[in-house]
Each structure stands twice: as structure tokens, then as C-alpha cells.
Amino acid sequence: MQNGGTMSKTIIVGGYGPGISAAVAEKFGAQGFSLALVGRNEERLGAAEKQLAAKGLNAKAFPADLSDPSGARALIDRVRRDLGPITVLHWNAYGGAAGDLLTATAAEVRGVFDVAISGLVAAVQAALPDLQQQADSAVLVTNGGLGLADPKIDAMAVQWNAMGLAIANAAKHKLVGLLAEKLRPQRIYVGEVVVLGIVKGTSFDKGQGTIDAHTIADKFWALYQARSDVTAQIG
């Protein structure tokens, strides 16, 4: 998309909802990015598109199921057509199934990896031609502390019935490191923010949230600007 003869930057905000992704959209939108809001809830996306437009930001809703690799690839094509080349891919999508690994079905176990790993890999592959052509391109990933290798955290994941999310987060952390290593020679930055706590205003917040989503968005922007550290923690 052209604006005064200058190619605008576009960020895909995958897994859009209240909290981290909304704050990231506002942060990058304020820096001149066009915003592709992606999620399964069309009503939520439509409302967010209007709210962001009211703030003077260029946002467009793209309903999609990011756990489906073919859907993720099709999404990239739609965003490219409507908003222009992708500069930043922000992956905030996650799956909460397979909470108890002793009773979870095989489909539930696959499901948490479909959104955390398979969908993300497919989206990166599809966006790669755009990312390769821009000097400030990036893949930014939201991750959670349940994936850390720590007996106390393991006990917490079991107690919270969030075992599937925990193993998906652990795999996503490894994926971020691998992508960072693979894409660094192409000057494509890859980084994650690992959230070590409950974010205010999200579905996890039952009144005990301690982390402001805008603090996380500011950290993502700082990582994007510095383009050096692969992992940062908040909480």
C-alpha cells in the first residue's frame, strides 16, 4: 500500500484479543504500521478494527484459524493483497487444550502444537519472501513461563491443568531459537517475550493480574528496535 509515495509497513497481529496483542497493535500502529488483526472471532476483530480506526490507526480484520497451516498461508496472501508486504509477524496465538496429559486425546495434544508450532512455521514460510526484502523485518513471538524447565513451574502447570500449554510453550521457545539462528544471516530478526505472570485484563486474569499489557508491548518494540536479544522475560 502506497502512502505519499512511501511503502507502508504492515504487522500481522496473530491471535488478536484483549491484552498483549491489543497493546502490541496500538504500539506498532502508533509507529506507522498498518495492522492486520487476525483471530477466529469475527465480531471481536470487527470491533477492534473500529476502535483502532477511531484512534487514527490503519487496521483491518482478517478472520482466520491459525491452527490450520493452510489457513495461515492463505492469511498471508490476503494480508499482502490488502495491506502490502509483511514487515513484522507477531504470533500471540495459543491453545489451551490437553490440560491433563493423562486423559487428553491425541487430537487435543496435536491441537496445542498446531497453533504454537505448525501454524507459526507455515506463516513464517509464507511471509518469508516479504521478510527477506525488508531491512527491518521481524518475527515476534509471545510466550509463557509455563514452558520453562523448572520443577516448581512443572508443579504449577499440573495444578492449573495447563500441561498442554506448558509443553507447547517449551517447544515454541526452542522454535524461536532455531528460527533466530536460521534467519539471522538474512537479517530477519526473531525474538520472544516470555511472560512470567498473569496479564491484567486477559482471560487468565481473575483479579490477580500483575502485568500491564502495554509494558509487554513496549518490550516487544524495544526488542524489535535493538534486534539483538532473542529472549526477554517480563514478570
Image (cartoon, rainbow, N blue to C red):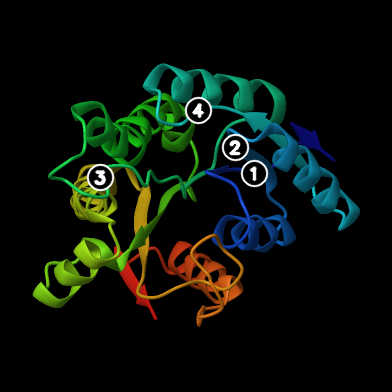
* Secondary structure of residue under mark 1: loop
Distance from Cα at disc 4 to Cα at disc 2: 8 Å
- The residue at 57%/55% (across/down) is 21
Q: Kindly indicate the quadrant of the structure image that contains residue 55.
A: bottom right
Q: How far apart are the alpha carbons under marks 2 and 1?
A: 17 Å
**Other residues around mark 1 within 10 Å, as few (<14) / some (14–19) / many (≥20):** many
Name the residue rendered at 62%, 27% in the picture: 79
Q: Residues within 10 Å of mark 2 (few under 14, many from 20)?
A: many
The residue sitting at 30% across, 39% down in the picture is 112
Would you say the residues marked 2 and 1 are in contact, meaning their CB atoms lie under 8 Å apart? no
- The amino acid beneath tag 4 is Asp
Label 4 close to label 1 by CB (< 8 Å): no
Callout in the foreground (4, 1): 4
Q: Up-down: is 169 above or below 93?
A: below
Outermost residue, right direction? 54
Cα separation, mark 2 vs mark 3, equals: 22 Å
Q: Earlier in the sequence, mark 4 or mark 3?
A: 4
Numbered disc in front, either 2 or 3: 2
The mark that comes first in sequence, 2 or 3, is: 2
Q: Is residue 231 left or right of residue 100?
A: right
The residue at which mark 4 appears reads as: 65
The circle on residue 38 is 2
> Can you say whether 36 is above or below 211 in the image?
above
The residue identified by callout 3 is 179
Task: Work out whether residue 53 or residue 132 is closer to the camera in this orientation and state it.
Answer: 53
Amino acid carrying mark 2 in the image:
Val
Label 4 or label 1, whichever comes before in sequence order: 1
Residue at which label 1 appears: 9
Q: CA distance from mark 4 to mark 3?
A: 22 Å
